[in-house]
Each structure stands twice: as C-alpha cells, then as structure tokens.
Amino acid sequence: MDWLTWLPALWKGTLDTLYMVGIATLFTILAGLPLGILLVVTDENGLIPAPLFNQVIGAVVNAARSLPFIILLVVVIPLTRMIVGTTIGATAAIVPLSLAAIPFFARVAETALREVDRGLVEAAQAMGCTPYQIIVKVLIPESLPSILLGVTITIISLISYSAMAGAIGGGGLGDLAIRYGYQRFQTDVMVATVILLIVLVQGIQIVGNRLARRVSKR
C-alpha cells in the first residue's frame, strides 16, 4: 500500500464514519429513550397504565427491529431523498442509520428502566411524586449506568451499520472497504479499514464502560 496516497482517504473515511455514527446516535437517544420510557410507564403495571397503547407501540418497535438493515437502506431511499435531497454520502446514511437504531435502543432503554428497584418507585409514589417526577428523578438516574452501556452497544451497532451503508455509497470506512478492498481486490485497503473499525469499537467500549462505572451508585 502507498500510505502517502491512502492515509488521506482513510482519515476522511474515519471522519465520515464518526460523523454518521455521532449524528445518528444523537437522534437515536432523543427518540429511542422517550420511546423506551413509554414502553415502561404504559405497561399494565406501569405509572400510566395503557395496555392497548403499549401493545401497539411494542408491535411497531418489534416490526422495525425485524427488518434487516440492508433492506431498510433500500426501503427508505425515497424518505432519505426527501429529507436530505440525496441518497449518496455520509449525510444521507444518517437517515437509515437512525431509523435502524431507534427501535433497538428503545428496547435497550426499556430493559434498563425495568431493572430499577420497584420499591424506589413505590416510595416515590407514597411521597406524592407525579409520574413525570418519578421518571426524571428515580427511573432515569437509577438506570443511568445501564442506559450508558446501552448507548455504547448502540454506537457499536451503528458502526457496523455504517460499514454496510457503504454498499450503496454511504461513505465512510465501509465505502472504502467495498469500493477498493472488495471491488478492486485491494486486500491491503480492506485490512486497513478493518483495523480502523476494530480500534474504533474498542475505544468506544472502553469509554462506555468507564462512564457507566463512574455514574454507578453501587
């Protein structure tokens, strides 16, 4: 490999991957966490019981999670074009990445919230706290370590998805690996992108674990 030629391309691919994953993670948290909270509080034993609504939301989340990402990339092409104006590039890839990660993170957040000690919730109810106060001051703070670990898992999944987005010109390291490493049989480029992806995943996992330990009250 001619490193002087490929280093700028690898650097740009890494930045594009971080850009896609970073923005998609933001949208995922903003939409997925409230969705996870809804799944918990509207349960038949939740703070605001609404079993029918809960079943509908749960079915929608399950349906979205069951769709393979490579198919989702194609299905949402019209939506991506409507929102971004194009279907090629790192910005365009943010739309399917977010849509794929939101239902996944919603279930992760739901699991984390359900781990909160029921006694704490009942104590807050006995003190006259409103459902909103219980969510903000009990459920989220107590489940924060698990939520942070869930965010870490989601980011790693998004990195994997972003590599697949390269199959349709999504940009990033996946695009480099497919266009040069696979289609042009440049194995050294493929190896370099794989190493960079491994480094990214390892770094994010380490940071996520440390943040979760730092906020843990146990």
Image: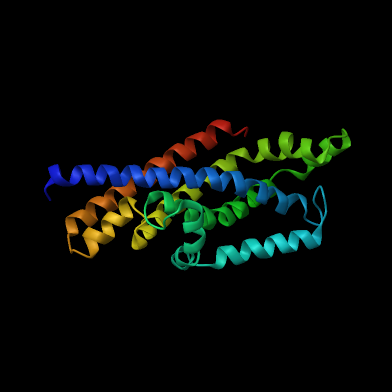
- Point out the image quarter for the C terminus: top right
The front one of 1 and 82 is 82
Q: Which residue occupies the foreground of this view, 94 or 123?
A: 94
Relative horizontal placement of residue 202, taking residue 68 as reference (left or right): left
**Residue at x 78%, y 53% (from the top left corner):** 42
Q: Residue furthest left?
A: 2
User: Horizontally, is 105 left or right of 50 in the view?
Assistant: left
Can residue 152 be spotted in the picture?
Answer: no
Q: Residue at x 56, y 56 (%)?
A: 104
Image x and y of residue 207, in percent: 44, 37
Q: Position of residue 105 (x, y in %)?
A: 57, 51
Is 87 above or below relative to 199?
below
Asked whether residue 193 appears in the rendered view, the answer is yes
To which quarter of the image does residue 184 belong? bottom left
> Total number of numbered labels?
0
Q: Nearer the viewer, residue 142 or 12?
A: 12
| 217 horizontally vs 207: left or right | right
In this rendering, position of residue 177 left or right of residue 23: left
Q: How is the image coloured?
A: rainbow
Rendered location of residue 152, percent (x, y): 49, 45
Residue name at image x 17 percent, y 59 percent: 186
